[in-house]
Image (cartoon, rainbow, N blue to C red):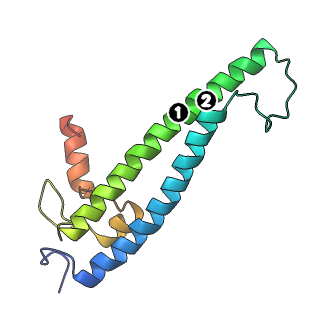
Amino acid sequence: MAEETKTRYSDEELAEFKAIIDDMLAKARAEYDTLRYVIMHNGSNDIEDTSPSFKTVEDDGASQLSKEEASQLAQRQYKFIQNLEAALVRIENKTYGICRETGKLIPKERLRLVPHATLTVEAKEKLAKSGRK
C-alpha cells in the first residue's frame, strides 16, 4: 500500500517511531539534567571548584554568559522534551505522523529525522509563507 493512500501508520511502524523517540527522549533528558546542573552549580565556590578564589571582572562576565547560554539551551531542551512527549501521546492515540494541516501522512524519512514533526515539509513551507507557525 502506498503511503499516499494510507491514512495512518501501522502498529509496527508506530513501534519503530516509538523506539526512536524513546532513545531521543533519554538523551534529551540527560542533556537537560546536565544543563540544569551547570546552571545550579555555576559560580558556586564549593569543593568541586578548583579555580582560584580571586577572579577578574572578565572571568565573571564569561561565567555569567555561559550560565545564560546554559539557561537558554536548557529552555530549548525542555521544549524539545515536551515535543517528544507529545509525539508519544500521538503514537498512543494512533494519530502520529499525520500532518495537522493537510491530514496526509508525513513521510517516514522526515519522521526519522524530526520525530516530533506535526507537519509535512510542504505544509510547513506554506505556513511559513503565510506568516503562521
Q: How many labels were placed on the picture?
A: 2
Position in image of residue 83 (x %, y %): 33, 52
Residue 62 sits above or below residue 21 on the image: above
- Residue 110 placed where, x, y %? 34, 64
Q: State the residue at coordinates (77%, 21%).
A: 59
Badge 2 amino acid: Lys
Image vertical order of residue 55 relative to residue 48, above or below: above
| Image marks 2 and 1: residues in contact by CB distance under 8 Å | yes
Q: Residue at x 44, y 60 (%)?
A: 25
Circle number at residue 67: 2
Q: Quadrant of residue 115?
A: bottom left
The x and y percentages for residue 117 are 30, 57
Q: What residue is rendered at 24% in x and 56% in y?
A: 118
Q: Amino acid at mark 1?
A: Ser
Q: Quadrant of the N terminus?
A: bottom left
Q: Which residue is mark 1?
A: 71
Q: Residue furthest bottom?
A: 1
Tell whether 46 sits left or right of 34: right
The percent position of residue 48, horizontal first and vertical second, equals: 79, 39
In terms of depth relative to the viewer, which is nearer, 84 or 98?
Answer: 84
Is 79 located above or below residue 61 in the figure?
Answer: below
